[in-house]
Protein backbone atom coordinates (compact mmCIF):
# COMPACT_ATOMS: atom_id res chain seq x y z
CA UNK A 1 0.00 0.00 0.00
CA UNK A 2 1.41 3.42 -0.98
CA UNK A 3 1.89 6.09 1.66
CA UNK A 4 -0.92 8.54 2.33
CA UNK A 5 -0.22 12.16 1.37
CA UNK A 6 0.64 14.55 4.20
CA UNK A 7 -1.76 17.44 3.71
CA UNK A 8 -1.58 19.32 7.03
CA UNK A 9 1.77 18.59 8.70
CA UNK A 10 2.12 19.51 12.36
CA UNK A 11 5.02 19.90 14.78
CA UNK A 12 3.98 18.77 18.23
CA UNK A 13 3.42 21.66 20.63
CA UNK A 14 3.70 24.39 17.99
CA UNK A 15 1.09 26.35 16.10
CA UNK A 16 1.49 27.10 12.41
CA UNK A 17 2.48 30.76 12.13
CA UNK A 18 1.84 30.85 8.38
CA UNK A 19 0.50 28.39 5.85
CA UNK A 20 1.59 28.74 2.25
CA UNK A 21 0.36 26.78 -0.75
CA UNK A 22 2.74 23.92 0.12
CA UNK A 23 4.68 24.82 3.28
CA UNK A 24 3.78 25.35 6.92
CA UNK A 25 5.95 27.82 8.83
CA UNK A 26 6.53 27.45 12.56
CA UNK A 27 8.02 30.43 14.41
CA UNK A 28 10.95 29.60 16.71
CA UNK A 29 12.05 33.15 17.51
CA UNK A 30 14.98 34.05 15.27
CA UNK A 31 14.51 30.81 13.35
CA UNK A 32 11.69 29.12 11.45
CA UNK A 33 10.81 25.52 10.84
CA UNK A 34 9.56 25.06 7.28
CA UNK A 35 7.61 21.85 6.74
CA UNK A 36 6.75 20.81 3.19
CA UNK A 37 3.36 19.14 2.81
CA UNK A 38 2.27 16.96 -0.10
CA UNK A 39 -0.13 19.61 -1.36
CA UNK A 40 0.30 20.74 -4.94
CA UNK A 41 -0.87 23.97 -6.54
CA UNK A 42 -1.53 24.99 -10.11
CA UNK A 43 -2.85 28.23 -11.56
CA UNK A 44 -2.55 29.69 -8.05
CA UNK A 45 -5.05 27.15 -6.67
CA UNK A 46 -4.23 24.45 -4.13
CA UNK A 47 -5.60 21.17 -5.43
CA UNK A 48 -7.65 18.90 -3.17
CA UNK A 49 -5.48 15.90 -4.13
CA UNK A 50 -2.08 15.43 -2.51
CA UNK A 51 1.02 13.91 -4.12
CA UNK A 52 2.41 11.29 -1.67
CA UNK A 53 6.01 11.95 -0.66
CA UNK A 54 6.29 15.20 -2.64
CA UNK A 55 7.14 17.35 0.37
CA UNK A 56 10.01 15.06 1.34
CA UNK A 57 11.43 15.11 -2.20
CA UNK A 58 11.21 18.92 -2.44
CA UNK A 59 12.99 19.31 0.89
CA UNK A 60 15.79 16.92 -0.03
CA UNK A 61 16.30 18.51 -3.46
CA UNK A 62 16.51 21.98 -1.87
CA UNK A 63 18.94 20.66 0.75
CA UNK A 64 21.16 19.33 -2.03
CA UNK A 65 21.24 22.62 -3.96
CA UNK A 66 21.90 24.74 -0.87
CA UNK A 67 24.97 22.60 -0.15
CA UNK A 68 26.09 22.19 -3.77
CA UNK A 69 25.99 25.70 -5.19
CA UNK A 70 28.54 28.31 -4.21
CA UNK A 71 26.30 30.97 -5.74
CA UNK A 72 23.51 29.92 -3.35
CA UNK A 73 25.43 31.36 -0.40
CA UNK A 74 24.37 33.06 1.77
CA UNK A 75 21.14 31.12 2.17
CA UNK A 76 18.65 30.57 4.96
CA UNK A 77 19.09 26.83 5.56
CA UNK A 78 20.57 25.88 8.93
CA UNK A 79 19.87 22.14 8.75
CA UNK A 80 17.43 19.62 7.32
CA UNK A 81 18.68 16.91 9.69
CA UNK A 82 16.20 16.37 12.52
CA UNK A 83 18.99 15.21 14.86
CA UNK A 84 20.61 18.67 14.57
CA UNK A 85 17.43 20.62 15.31
CA UNK A 86 16.43 22.19 18.65
CA UNK A 87 15.00 19.77 21.17
CA UNK A 88 11.61 21.47 20.96
CA UNK A 89 11.07 20.26 17.38
CA UNK A 90 13.50 17.34 17.08
CA UNK A 91 11.01 14.52 17.61
CA UNK A 92 8.36 16.19 15.50
CA UNK A 93 10.82 16.68 12.66
CA UNK A 94 11.88 13.02 12.90
CA UNK A 95 8.24 11.96 12.65
CA UNK A 96 7.82 14.11 9.54
CA UNK A 97 10.65 12.13 7.92
CA UNK A 98 12.75 14.54 5.90
CA UNK A 99 10.14 17.24 5.28
CA UNK A 100 11.48 19.88 7.69
CA UNK A 101 14.06 22.62 7.18
CA UNK A 102 15.32 24.73 10.07
CA UNK A 103 16.07 28.15 8.60
CA UNK A 104 17.16 31.61 9.60
CA UNK A 105 14.30 34.06 9.77
CA UNK A 106 14.51 36.65 6.99
CA UNK A 107 12.39 39.50 5.75
CA UNK A 108 11.36 38.35 2.28
CA UNK A 109 11.85 40.62 -0.72
CA UNK A 110 8.28 40.75 -2.10
CA UNK A 111 9.12 39.74 -5.68
CA UNK A 112 9.63 36.43 -7.47
CA UNK A 113 13.01 36.34 -9.22
CA UNK A 114 12.38 34.30 -12.37
CA UNK A 115 15.14 33.29 -14.77
CA UNK A 116 14.42 31.79 -18.19
CA UNK A 117 17.02 29.94 -20.23
CA UNK A 118 14.72 28.38 -22.83
CA UNK A 119 11.57 29.46 -24.63
CA UNK A 120 8.62 27.69 -23.00
CA UNK A 121 5.46 28.25 -21.02
CA UNK A 122 4.11 31.78 -20.81
CA UNK A 123 7.31 33.08 -22.41
CA UNK A 124 6.61 31.05 -25.55
CA UNK A 125 3.02 32.30 -25.68
CA UNK A 126 4.13 35.94 -25.44
CA UNK A 127 6.92 35.44 -27.99
CA UNK A 128 4.43 34.10 -30.55
CA UNK A 129 2.36 37.29 -30.20
CA UNK A 130 4.99 39.97 -29.62
CA UNK A 131 8.44 38.47 -30.38
CA UNK A 132 9.49 39.27 -26.82
CA UNK A 133 9.44 37.82 -23.31
CA UNK A 134 8.29 40.42 -20.85
CA UNK A 135 10.31 43.50 -21.86
CA UNK A 136 13.04 41.56 -23.65
CA UNK A 137 12.90 41.66 -27.45
CA UNK A 138 14.09 38.46 -29.10
CA UNK A 139 15.23 37.52 -32.61
CA UNK A 140 12.65 36.13 -35.05
CA UNK A 141 12.34 32.46 -35.87
CA UNK A 142 12.77 30.95 -32.41
CA UNK A 143 10.97 27.68 -31.80
CA UNK A 144 9.28 26.22 -28.74
CA UNK A 145 12.06 24.91 -26.49
CA UNK A 146 14.86 26.84 -28.17
CA UNK A 147 17.61 28.16 -25.90
CA UNK A 148 17.42 31.92 -25.49
CA UNK A 149 20.38 34.00 -26.69
CA UNK A 150 21.13 34.52 -22.99
CA UNK A 151 19.22 33.74 -19.80
CA UNK A 152 16.59 36.38 -19.04
CA UNK A 153 15.70 37.85 -15.66
CA UNK A 154 11.91 38.30 -15.68
CA UNK A 155 10.68 39.19 -12.18
CA UNK A 156 7.07 39.16 -11.04
CA UNK A 157 5.15 40.49 -8.09
CA UNK A 158 4.57 38.12 -5.19
CA UNK A 159 0.87 38.16 -4.46
CA UNK A 160 -0.56 36.85 -1.19
CA UNK A 161 -3.81 36.27 -3.07
CA UNK A 162 -4.56 36.02 -6.77
CA UNK A 163 -1.99 35.90 -9.54
CA UNK A 164 1.60 37.13 -9.58
CA UNK A 165 2.06 39.80 -12.26
CA UNK A 166 5.12 40.54 -14.43
CA UNK A 167 7.08 43.63 -13.46
CA UNK A 168 9.66 45.46 -15.56
CA UNK A 169 13.19 45.88 -14.30
CA UNK A 170 12.51 49.62 -14.06
CA UNK A 171 9.49 48.84 -11.90
CA UNK A 172 11.63 46.61 -9.69
CA UNK A 173 14.19 49.42 -9.34
CA UNK A 174 11.43 51.81 -8.32
CA UNK A 175 10.20 49.34 -5.70
CA UNK A 176 13.48 48.23 -4.09
CA UNK A 177 16.15 50.64 -5.34
CA UNK A 178 18.82 50.32 -8.03
CA UNK A 179 21.43 48.51 -5.94
CA UNK A 180 18.97 45.92 -4.63
CA UNK A 181 17.42 45.34 -8.07
CA UNK A 182 20.88 44.88 -9.60
CA UNK A 183 21.79 42.43 -6.83
CA UNK A 184 18.59 40.40 -7.27
CA UNK A 185 19.24 40.11 -11.00
CA UNK A 186 22.94 39.27 -10.70
CA UNK A 187 22.43 36.70 -7.97
CA UNK A 188 19.52 35.02 -9.75
CA UNK A 189 21.47 34.72 -13.00
CA UNK A 190 24.55 33.38 -11.20
CA UNK A 191 22.58 30.65 -9.41
CA UNK A 192 20.78 29.73 -12.61
CA UNK A 193 24.08 29.42 -14.51
CA UNK A 194 25.75 27.23 -11.90
CA UNK A 195 22.67 25.04 -11.45
CA UNK A 196 22.22 24.67 -15.23
CA UNK A 197 25.78 23.46 -15.63
CA UNK A 198 25.30 20.82 -12.93
CA UNK A 199 21.92 19.74 -14.29
CA UNK A 200 23.45 19.10 -17.73
CA UNK A 201 25.96 16.71 -16.18
CA UNK A 202 22.94 14.78 -14.89
CA UNK A 203 21.17 14.72 -18.27
CA UNK A 204 18.75 17.54 -17.40
CA UNK A 205 18.08 20.92 -18.96
CA UNK A 206 17.00 23.63 -16.56
CA UNK A 207 14.52 25.57 -18.66
CA UNK A 208 13.40 28.17 -16.12
CA UNK A 209 13.05 28.63 -12.39
CA UNK A 210 12.10 31.10 -9.70
CA UNK A 211 13.98 32.23 -6.62
CA UNK A 212 13.02 34.06 -3.46
CA UNK A 213 15.43 36.19 -1.48
CA UNK A 214 15.41 37.74 1.96
CA UNK A 215 17.06 40.88 3.24
CA UNK A 216 20.11 40.57 5.44
CA UNK A 217 19.96 42.34 8.80
CA UNK A 218 21.10 45.68 7.39
CA UNK A 219 19.48 45.20 3.95
CA UNK A 220 22.88 44.97 2.33
CA UNK A 221 22.34 44.09 -1.37
CA UNK A 222 25.64 42.20 -1.33
CA UNK A 223 24.29 39.85 1.36
CA UNK A 224 20.92 38.81 -0.02
CA UNK A 225 19.77 35.55 1.56
CA UNK A 226 18.46 32.82 -0.75
CA UNK A 227 15.21 31.52 0.78
CA UNK A 228 12.36 29.05 0.37
CA UNK A 229 12.71 25.98 -1.84
CA UNK A 230 15.36 25.94 -4.56
CA UNK A 231 15.37 24.42 -8.05
CA UNK A 232 12.71 21.79 -7.42
CA UNK A 233 10.09 20.43 -9.84
CA UNK A 234 7.57 22.71 -8.09
CA UNK A 235 9.56 25.89 -8.76
CA UNK A 236 11.39 24.97 -11.97
CA UNK A 237 10.81 23.57 -15.43
CA UNK A 238 13.08 20.67 -16.38
CA UNK A 239 13.61 18.88 -19.69
CA UNK A 240 15.51 15.65 -20.16
CA UNK A 241 18.36 16.41 -22.53
CA UNK A 242 17.87 13.09 -24.33
CA UNK A 243 14.22 13.93 -25.07
CA UNK A 244 14.54 17.60 -25.91
CA UNK A 245 13.86 18.55 -29.55
CA UNK A 246 13.31 22.28 -30.16
CA UNK A 247 10.09 22.87 -32.03
CA UNK A 248 8.35 19.91 -30.41
CA UNK A 249 6.51 19.65 -27.11
CA UNK A 250 8.54 17.61 -24.64
CA UNK A 251 7.55 15.40 -21.74
CA UNK A 252 7.40 17.57 -18.59
CA UNK A 253 9.59 16.54 -15.67
CA UNK A 254 8.00 18.97 -13.23
CA UNK A 255 4.47 19.92 -12.22
CA UNK A 256 3.68 20.92 -15.80
CA UNK A 257 2.22 17.42 -16.04
CA UNK A 258 -0.49 18.50 -13.58
CA UNK A 259 -1.04 21.83 -15.35
CA UNK A 260 -1.41 20.06 -18.70
CA UNK A 261 -4.02 17.73 -17.26
CA UNK A 262 -5.97 20.61 -15.71
CA UNK A 263 -5.80 22.71 -18.89
CA UNK A 264 -7.68 19.94 -20.71
CA UNK A 265 -10.63 20.16 -18.32
CA UNK A 266 -13.64 22.44 -18.38
CA UNK A 267 -12.35 24.40 -15.37
CA UNK A 268 -12.06 28.19 -15.16
CA UNK A 269 -8.87 28.13 -13.03
CA UNK A 270 -10.65 29.47 -9.95
CA UNK A 271 -11.30 27.61 -6.66
CA UNK A 272 -12.43 25.02 -5.98
CA UNK A 273 -9.94 23.06 -8.05
CA UNK A 274 -10.82 19.58 -9.33
CA UNK A 275 -9.44 16.33 -7.96
CA UNK A 276 -6.55 14.64 -9.77
CA UNK A 277 -7.07 11.09 -11.04
CA UNK A 278 -4.95 8.30 -9.63
CA UNK A 279 -2.87 7.89 -12.80
CA UNK A 280 -1.82 11.57 -12.77
CA UNK A 281 -0.90 11.32 -9.07
CA UNK A 282 1.19 8.19 -9.65
CA UNK A 283 2.97 9.62 -12.68
CA UNK A 284 3.71 12.88 -10.85
CA UNK A 285 5.23 10.92 -7.94
CA UNK A 286 7.37 8.92 -10.38
CA UNK A 287 8.64 12.00 -12.21
CA UNK A 288 9.43 13.94 -9.03
CA UNK A 289 11.30 10.92 -7.70
CA UNK A 290 13.32 10.59 -10.91
CA UNK A 291 14.23 14.28 -10.92
CA UNK A 292 15.34 13.94 -7.27
CA UNK A 293 17.48 10.93 -8.11
CA UNK A 294 19.06 12.55 -11.18
CA UNK A 295 19.85 15.85 -9.48
CA UNK A 296 21.21 14.42 -6.23
CA UNK A 297 22.76 11.24 -7.60
CA UNK A 298 20.77 9.22 -5.06
Image: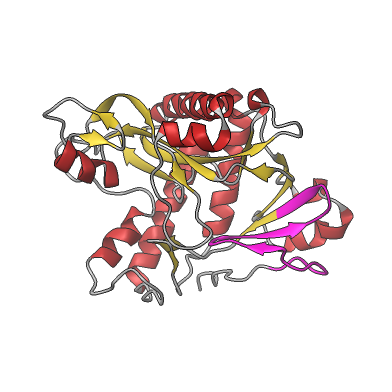
Q: Relative to residue 203, is residue 123 drawn left or right?
A: left
Instruction: Decide which of 14, 128 is in the foreground and name it.
Output: 128
Q: Residue furthest front?
A: 174
Q: Give the residue at x 60% y 46%.
A: 228
Instruction: Decide which of 11, 164 is in the foreground and name it.
Output: 164
Q: Position of residue 45 (x, y in %)?
A: 43, 66
Q: Give the residue at x 87% y 59%.
A: 88
Instruction: Decide which of 70, 287 is in the foreground and name it.
Output: 70
Where residue 11 sits, quadrant-wise, is bottom right
Q: Which residues are magenta?
A: 10-33
Q: Position of residue 199 (x, y in %)?
A: 43, 31
Question: In the picture shown, does residue 113 fall above or below 147?
Answer: below
Question: In the picture shown, does residue 258 fall above or below 49?
Answer: above
Exactly how many numbered labels are in the figure? Answer: 0
Where residue 47 sits, quadrant-wise, is bottom left
Where residue 145 sits, quadrant-wise, is top left
Whether residue 297 is visible, yes or no, is no
Q: Give the residue at x 17% y 38%.
A: 130
Q: Give the residue at x 71% y 43%.
A: 106
Q: Is residue 86 found inside the magenta-colored segment of the image?
A: no
Q: Residue furthest right?
A: 87
Q: Relative to residue 73, is residue 148 drawn left or right?
A: left
Q: Position of residue 289 (x, y in %)?
A: 46, 51
Whether residue 264 is visible, yes or no, is yes
Q: Relative to residue 47, is residue 265 drawn left or right?
A: left
Amino acid sequence: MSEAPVINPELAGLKTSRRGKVRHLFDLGDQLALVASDRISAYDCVLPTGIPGKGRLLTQISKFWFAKLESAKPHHLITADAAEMPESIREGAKALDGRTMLVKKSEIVPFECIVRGYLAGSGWKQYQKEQKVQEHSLPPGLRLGDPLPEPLFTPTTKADEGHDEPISFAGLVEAVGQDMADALKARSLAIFKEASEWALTRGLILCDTKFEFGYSENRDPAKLVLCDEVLTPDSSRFFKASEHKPGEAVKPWDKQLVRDYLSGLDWDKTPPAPELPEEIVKETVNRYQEIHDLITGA
